[in-house]
Amino acid sequence: MSHHHSQFVEVGFRDLDQSKDKFWHLEHQWFSFSAHQGGREYMEDRMHCLCDPDSNFSVFSIFDGHGGEYVSDYLEKHYSSTVRHRILKNTGHTDGDEYAHAIKKAIAFTIHEIDTHIAEKNPAKTADAGSTLCSAVIQNNKYLTVANVGDSRAIASDSQGNCVVLTKDHKPSDVKEKLRVEEAGGVILQYKNDVERVQGILAMTRSVGDATLKPNEVVISVPDVKTYDLSKQQFRYIILASDGLFDVVSNEEAIQMANSYMQAHGTSALSKVANILCTEALRRGSLDNVSVLILKLVL
């Protein structure tokens, strides 16, 4: 990602004007965002982008809140700056495996710290409210690190236009996650016409918040973190989105739609793709909040 300008950029969902029909948009030189409230009474999805060219550091995140907006809102306000500080402190003068280890520790520490802090600071609000976290960090024009807690998802297009899935959903349907929950003494319950839920409550096995489900680590906030060396693995662009998109549009379809739109309208049209995916999710009847964030890497 070449930074032609050296401005510090910081923008979140809260900074966007709601256009009519509960639609939100943001277009930037190398990222774009689109969201819709869907069939929900409230908009609990949040997002944040921070680009710090002087430190050669950017972080882009989606936070899909549930049980209220307290946790997703808190993450939007505090995650980027906290994780930036911790990563820059931890990764200085590291490279390769050492870098990957250092950034993983920095991200995991930050999320744990926030999770603990909000539960202590506001027990009433965090008892039953929580959020996913799906975040991409790009550092030194060389490393991409993707961190994930919950069921928001990151996918990418490789240089050939193929879909590469960067995260794994933390859901009860995942065999390893189910086993982890059960070993912690939790149960996965499924009521009629509903998805599987931890303790019959939460449709994901990891989250930030949800303090009621945190004792004995039945639900945890530990992220999966993976680092890619962009000099070895070329990605054209990355899509981060809440499950409001992926419930109705498959990973492959999302990449295919993005690619064919750009084939028709040129690569600069990537800025419109978030909007196209969001609109398609609605057209297919997604009832959830839908948020789509697209980052341009190489085009």
Image: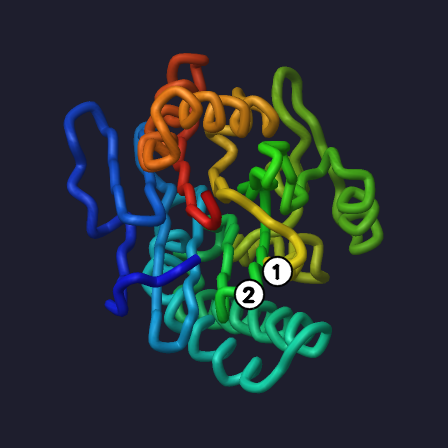
Which residue: 69% across, 73% down?
A: 96
Q: Are marks 2 and 1 in contact (CB under 8 Å)?
A: yes
Q: Name which of mark 2 and mark 1 comes first in the sequence.
A: 2
Residue ID for mark 1: 231
Instruction: Identify the amino acid type marked 1.
Output: Ser
Which residue: 64% across, 61% down?
A: 229
**Residue 289 seen anywhere in this rendered image of the structure:** yes
Quarter of the image with the N terminus is bottom left
Which residue: 48% across, 80% down?
A: 88
Residue ID for mark 2: 142
Foreground of the two, 64 or 2: 2
Q: How far apart are marks 2 and 1 (CA)?
A: 6 Å
Outermost residue toward the top?
A: 284
**Residue 202 seen anywhere in this rendered image of the structure:** no
Q: Residues within 10 Å of mark 2 (few under 14, many from 20)?
A: some
Foreground of the two, 281 or 298: 298
Q: Is residue 206 left or right of residue 113?
A: right
Instruction: Identify the amino acid type marked 2.
Output: Lys
Residue 127 vs 189, above or below: the answer is below
Which residue: 67% across, 44% down?
A: 168
Residue 239 vs 215, above or below: the answer is above
